[in-house]
Image (cartoon, grey):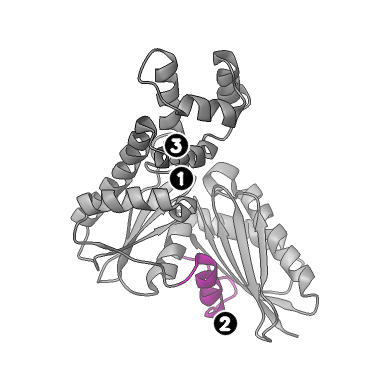
Amino acid sequence: MPELIVGLDAGGTKTSLLARTPDDAADVRLRGPAANLLRAGREETARVLASLVRTALATRPRARLSAICAGVAGAGSPDARKSLSASLRHNLRDLKPFHLLLMHDGALALEAAFGGLSGLILIAGTGSIVFARTFGGDTVRAGGWGYVIGDEGSGHAIGLRGLRAVTDALDGGEATDLVRVVREEFGAASRRELLRAVYRCKKPIAHLTKPILGAASAGDSVARRVVLQEVRLLARTAAALVSRSPPMRPAVCLFGGLSQSATYRAYMETALSEELPSFELVESRQSQLEAAVRVATSLKGKSTGSVAP
């Protein structure tokens, strides 16, 4: 019976799965809903992960689940990972024993970017966080405080700063095309409709990031300032981490949904050149899903109760 190796990358916008068998069959690639542990909670996060695993198994009915490695946003503490591990195993309790390794999505991104080597990563998606591995092998982090009190440079932070620029313009402040952008995105033609969209309908503020980046690229000065202010805050978080940590390789890699935007990358490159001039912006060695599958494959021979420390 072939063994199915599963890698998962769970974040604030979506959860992705890559599953592979050693018989060279085509990879299984799936996408599911967001599964940030802090926002969705343990049971919902476990349900999303288990559902994707079961769907992958259904495409390979002759395969047996062998190992899972999952990088999960919000899984920052060992206790959180242990609790999520128990819930995930409960959701898959009818399956034969399998290896399981849970880690923070930042730790998974470090593996993807540098393998076991030293380096710095910035994750900028719906939220944001900075992770690094020192020359001595220690993992250090900064940011990742969540959308209420942190997540500088993230989709939510850019969207929120953009919204504030819009309300300032509507109150007589500096004019900006972001007024049109936000009205179109939220379908809000009036002050009342905008308030309703934000406070009652709770439209995802991070969804404003793409049109804000578009307005910045088109030359809107307010939109450009919104993006630059946020990426500088994230770059400064990275610089502060470097300054208080043991030495590390001067290489930085971007991850997260915003890293796919050429406009965002250009602004971040400028901010990093100011805050960390000795660091080189590099490409990741492999995707987070590929890294998850690689790590899951390495679990063979270890206890089936493995959970990331």
Check the image and report above or below for 122 versus 126.
below
Tell me the number on the disc at residue 300: 2
The residue under the point 22% across, 55% down is 276
Determine the secondary structure under disc 3.
helix
Q: Which sits earlier in the primary sequence, circle 1 or circle 2?
A: 1
Give, as a three-letter code, the residue at label 1. Answer: Gly
Q: In the image, residue 2 lies at what x, y percent?
A: 72, 84
Q: Residue at x 44, y 63 (%)?
A: 109
Place residue 18 in its image quadrant.
Answer: bottom right
Q: Secondary structure at mark 2?
A: loop
Residue at image point 56% right, 20% down: 194
What residue type is disc 2 on? Lys
State yes or no: residue 305 in magenta.
yes
Q: Which residues are magenta?
A: 286-309
- Is residue 300 placed above or below 184 in the rendered structure? below
161 and 108: which one is in front? 161
Instruction: List the residue tagged with mark 3.
Output: 215
Closer to the chain start, of discs 3 and 2, is 3
Quick check: 62 left or right of 292? right
